Amino acid sequence: MRHFLTLLDLSPEELNWLIQRAIELKQLHKRGEVYEPLKNRVLGMVFEKSSTRTRVSFEAGMAQLGGHAIFLSPRDTQLGRGEPVEDSARVLSRMLDVVMIRTFDHEMIETFAAYSQVPVINALTDDFHPCQLLADMQTFAEHRGSIQGKTVAWIGDGNNMCHSYINAARQFDFHLNIAAPEGFDPAQFLLDENKDRVTLMRDPKEAVAGAHLVTTDVWASMGQEEEQEERARKFRDFQVSREMLDLAAEDVIFMHCLPAHRGEEISEDLLDDPRSVVWDEAENRLHAQKALLEFLLCQED
């Protein structure tokens, strides 16, 4: 049994296999071919944070693979009434084949996995968002081939997405430039562990120079809404625009995990730029997660 709590739970070879498998499953789906390796398998989806792409992609993915998904919110379960995570994990994992959790505290999902009898997938915590990185790496591979040896620029908050990009730099072997305002750096232990392939900067223009992929996220994530005005002031020079992309490599592509706030972390017109691949990136959540579910549940095959 394997869990997927961060990108480090899989080897670089396994991750690259997953990306290629996601591309294959996407092509299979586009051809209209029925492929149902997860028939009679059930995914439990535990949501403590709201979602659009995560819920739809996992639910649709299980349906396309012949399985079923159950949506569980804190309002509908004993988790929301104070049942210990350990007890919920013991019970749910006796009834389900795989569990996906989207929550705040990363420690919660680690505890759940420790007591679970089935694979657990991190669908976002405050510290990491590895499923999004699978989709991002698939998207880059589809548009530009291997990301190995390339330069990626992360612009903005050193948040869970930034943390997962640091892990991706390690696992997929690329260099990551991070441009963040002072006080919004990613976790120091991640910078220390990956100092050979991660460079922290204060100037976003310097970070994007020569980059093959430029990516960003909202300035205030879920749970940080009260900081919105203060963050807007501190991040105002970190907006990604068409002019900023002009400083990158000639074949640069732009990604954003969405939802995007036009006029804040990106210019109003950036998503319409031909260098933007955000819609492919969003769709690939579906196919990358299908590959992940297949990997976790069909390892013997």
Image (cartoon, grey):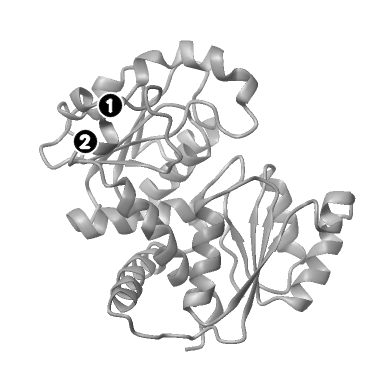
Residue 202 in view, yes or no:
no
Name the residue: 37% across, 22% down.
263
- Kindly check if marks 2 and 1 are in contact, taking CB atoms under 8 A apart as contact: yes
Q: Relative to 244, is 284 above or below? A: below
Q: Position of residue 160 (x, y in %)?
A: 53, 39
Q: Relative to 205, is 151 above or below? A: below
Total count of labels: 2
Q: Quadrant of the N terminus?
A: bottom right
Residue at mark 2:
211
Q: Position of residue 31 (x, y in %)?
A: 27, 79
Where on the picture, by quarter, is residue 154?
Answer: top left
Q: Which mark is residue 76?
A: none
Residue 233 in view, yes or no:
yes
Mark 1, Cα crowd under 10 Å, few <14 / some 14-19 / many 20+, is many
Q: In 3D space, how far apart are the residues under numbered discs 2 and 1 (Cα atoms)?
A: 8 Å
Mark 2, Cα crowd under 10 Å, few <14 / some 14-19 / many 20+, is many
Task: Judge left or right: residue 215 versus residue 300.
Answer: left
Name the residue: 31% across, 54% down.
280
Task: Judge left or right: residue 150 versus residue 194.
Answer: left
Q: Amino acid at mark 1?
A: Ala
Q: Amino acid at mark 2?
A: Ala
Residue at mark 1:
207
Q: Position of residue 45 (x, y in %)?
A: 65, 62
Q: Position of residue 105 (x, y in %)?
A: 69, 43
Q: Relative to 2, is 161 above or below? A: above
Name the residue: 87% across, 55% down.
84
**Nearer to the camera, 243 or 109:** 243
**Nearer to the camera, 53 or 15:** 53
**Nearer to the camera, 198 or 141:** 141
**Nearer to the camera, 16 or 297:** 297
Name the residue: 28% across, 74% down.
27
- What secondary structure is found at the residue carrying circle 2? loop
